[in-house]
Image (tube, grey):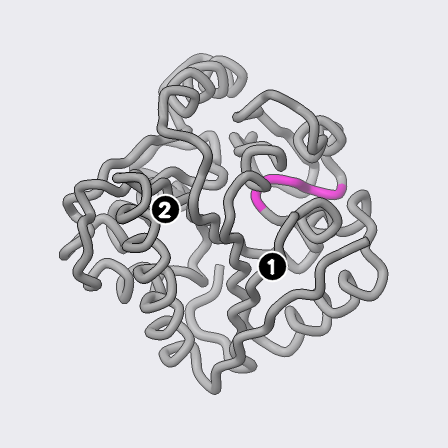
């Protein structure tokens, strides 16, 4: 049985970005006040860039925040497809330049070796994650949980103790590294940022008939202990 998602609707991507930044900043401040630090996991693509820039200007104890990608492409950090590059150029600036960053990508011969290194580094963080921000592709994937991936069952197993996995999928342009579903589910706040009527229709279909194999974001809905927070605008801003 799924929790009913909580929708936050905005007329424009700009309005969404500003309010989303306010809400996430408040959550981080509250977390830091309670446990002295906060772990923020963020997704890539170009949709969150405006939100990242808004969040970067919010004043809070950024030195106590560690940012980690939800997933990453196995590409150099100089690549325009690198989520790390996106995060560094749009989030880890302004006030947020003081935040710490734990990457998933490592320059290794294979994605699996990079995943092993990332697993070790993520395990050393003050887990669990506090805030997770997800996106959703037109095929219903989130993080690097792809419907055509042979690794899907592994990375979406809510009981797995693994924190980071290497992933391949015919629909992905390159191998990926991703936090596992079990890692994401530990966060008390999980938000989904989507824009456009097509994404809303897709997600409402997921809510009506969740199927993790066909639309992997269903796994988040089915296993999350708290309602997913949806930040949505009918208009589209920057898109991936």
Residue 145 sits above or below residue 228 on the image: above
Q: CA distance from mark 1 to mark 2?
A: 30 Å
Question: Would you call the spot at circle 2 few (<14 residues within 10 Å), some (14-19), or many (20 or more)?
Answer: few
Question: Would you call the spot at circle 1 few (<14 residues within 10 Å), some (14-19), or many (20 or more)?
Answer: many
- Secondary structure of the residue carrying numbered label 1: loop
In the rendered structure, the answer to whether residue 181 lies left or right of residue 81 reads: right
How many circles with numbers are drawn on the protein?
Answer: 2
- Identify the residue at horizontal 77%, vertical 61% (top origin): 206
Residue 76 sits above or below residue 16 on the image: above
- Identify the residue at horizontal 76%, vertical 39% (top origin): 148
Quadrant hosting residue 201: bottom right
- Secondary structure of the residue carrying numbered label 2: loop
Q: Residue furthest front?
A: 34
In the rendered structure, the answer to whether residue 97 lies left or right of residue 137 reads: left
How far across and how far down the image is residue 21, in percent? 33, 66
Proximity of marks 1 and 2: CB atoms separated by less than 8 Å: no
In the rendered structure, the answer to whether residue 83 lies left or right of residue 176 reads: left
How far across and how far down the image is residue 142, in percent? 61, 48
Which residue position is annotated with label 2? Answer: 80
Main secondary-structure element of the magenta-colored stretch = loop
Inspect the magenta stretch and tell me whether residue 215 lies in it. Answer: no
Mark 1 vs mark 2, foreground winner is: 1
- Identify the residue at horizontal 36%, vertical 40% (top origin): 39
Q: Which mark is residue 157?
A: none
- Identify the residue at horizontal 44%, vertical 83% (top origin): 12
How far across and how far down the image is residue 137, in percent? 62, 56
Q: Camera-side residue: 29 or 208? A: 29
Question: What span is in magenta?
Answer: 143-147
Quadrant hosting residue 77: top left
Which badge, 1 or 2, is on the more N-terminal residue? 2
Which residue position is annotated with label 1? Answer: 228
């Amino acid at each position: 049985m799924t929790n009913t998602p909580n929708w936050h609707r905005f007329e424009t991507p700009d309005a969404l970005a500003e309010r989303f930044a306010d809400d996430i900043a408040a959550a981080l401040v509250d977390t830091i006040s309670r446990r002295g630090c906060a772990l923020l996991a963020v997704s890539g693509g170009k949709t969150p860039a405006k939100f990242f820039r808004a969040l970067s200007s919010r004043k809070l104890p950024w030195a106590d925040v560690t940012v980690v990608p939800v997933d990453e492409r196995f590409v150099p950090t100089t690549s325009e497809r690198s989520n790390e590059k996106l995060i560094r150029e749009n989030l880890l600036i302004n006030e947020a330049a003081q935040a710490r960053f734990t990457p998933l990508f490592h320059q290794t011969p294979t994605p699996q070796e990079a995943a092993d290194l990332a697993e070790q580094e993520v395990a050393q963080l003050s887990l669990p994650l506090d805030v997770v921000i997800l996106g959703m592709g037109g095929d219903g994937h989130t993080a690097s949980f792809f419907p055509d991936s042979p690794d899907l069952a592994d990375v979406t197993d809510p009981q797995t103790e693994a924190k980071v996995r290497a992933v391949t999928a015919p629909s992905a342009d390159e191998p990926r590294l991703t936090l596992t579903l079990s890692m994401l589910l530990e966060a008390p706040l999980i938000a989904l940022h989507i824009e456009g009527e097509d994404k809303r229709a897709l997600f409402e279909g997921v809510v009506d008939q969740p199927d993790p194999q066909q639309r992997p974001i269903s796994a988040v809905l089915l296993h999350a202990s708290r309602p997913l927070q949806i930040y949505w605008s009918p208009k589209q801003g920057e898109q991936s």
